[in-house]
Image (cartoon, rainbow, N blue to C red):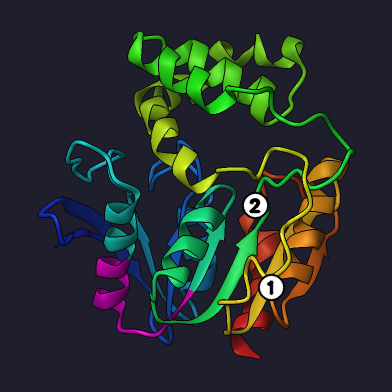
Amino acid sequence: MSTSTVISKDGTVIAYDRIGSGPAVVLVDGAFCYRDMGPCTAVAQELSDQYTVYTYDRRGRGESGDTLPYDQQREIEDLAAVTAEAGEPVALCTFSSGVGLVLAAVEHGLAVGKLALYEYPLITDDSRKPAPPGYQDHITELIAAGKPGAAIKYFMHAGVGLPSALVALFPLMPGWSKMKKTAFTLTYDRYFMQDVLDGRPIPAGRYDYVSVPTTVFAGSKSPQWMRHGNVALAHAIPGANYVELPGQTHQVKARLFTPTLKKFLAA
């Protein structure tokens, strides 16, 4: 598997890999992640016996370029450029905050065949406290101040809801240096996470524009608020199904996820 590139509409170089043969599937990462860190590469390997799978580095990550100032429309155009290489309409499978990017792309007219959405971080009820007021702004301030580590810790505690004692151990984890390198892209992801951590129900009709077969996935061992939010998301997308994967968490294991994903893609 060798890296290829595609030029996005604004001239930014986007790096991607292609593996396997069969119908096209494009995988989209969430916060921090790119081809060297995150679930997409492992999922691609598991899917490649039946599908042609595309993984790419979102702008500002890995081997992809970055053009300032950031504009969320440019990320949508990046995804459109990758799907054009794959041949539209493709199936999209995305994880965590990447769900927000994919849904925004579909809202802006990206042609897709199917959507597989894994654990969009939605707080839609009182099963946990919402993110504090000014949460996204504070992350942006920490990044601007040159404090990526502090931004990650704040994101993990105030946004993800991890206990502060666990968050304090993050600098000891193997992936810490990679996370710090891409921490600034948290300020990009904010545009796809507006209002989803406020604890309010999804507004009626919010996702009525989604008209393709969609499955929303969550892990049975993920926090209650995450599962509740994704059940709500499935209810809000016309005709969508909700599938809970036994024993899985937000860090889903590719070999346990892909058999269920393959069933959805083949249906």
| 94 vs 236: above or below | above
Q: Residue shown at 62%/84% (left/top)?
A: 213
The x and y percentages for residue 114 are 55, 80
Circle 2: residue type: Tyr
Horizontally, is 149 left or right of 221 in the view?
left
Q: Residue shown at 47%/70% (left/top)?
A: 107
Q: Tell which of 110 and 116 is nearer to you.
A: 110
Locate residue 99: give its quadrant.
bottom right
Farthest residue, direction front: 204
Using a 10 Å C-alpha cutoff, classify the residue at mark 1 as few (fewer than 14 neighbours), some (14 to 19) or many (20 or more).
many
Q: Residue shown at 31%/55% (left/top)?
A: 73
| 261 vs 68: above or below | below
The residue that label 1 is drawn on is 237
Q: Quadrant of the C terminus?
A: bottom right
The x and y percentages for residue 5 are 17, 59
Farthest residue, direction bottom: 267
Horizontally, is 75 left or right of 189 in the view?
left
The residue that label 2 is drawn on is 120
Q: Tell which of 34 and 216 is nearer to you.
A: 216
Circle 1: residue type: Ile
Q: Residue shown at 27%/53% (left/top)?
A: 74
Where does the magenta region start and end?
80-91
- Which label lies toward us, 2 or 1? 1
The span from disc 2 to disc 1 (Cα, nearest Å) is: 13 Å
Locate residue 238: give its quadrant.
bottom right
Label 2 or label 1, whichever comes before in sequence order: 2
Number of numbered callouts drawn = 2
**Mark 2, secondary structure of its residue:** loop
Is residue 37 among the parts visible in the rendering? Answer: no
Could you tell me if the residues under marks 2 and 1 are in contact, i.e. CB atoms within 8 Å?
A: no
The x and y percentages for residue 259 are 68, 72
Q: Tell which of 237 and 114 is nearer to you.
A: 237
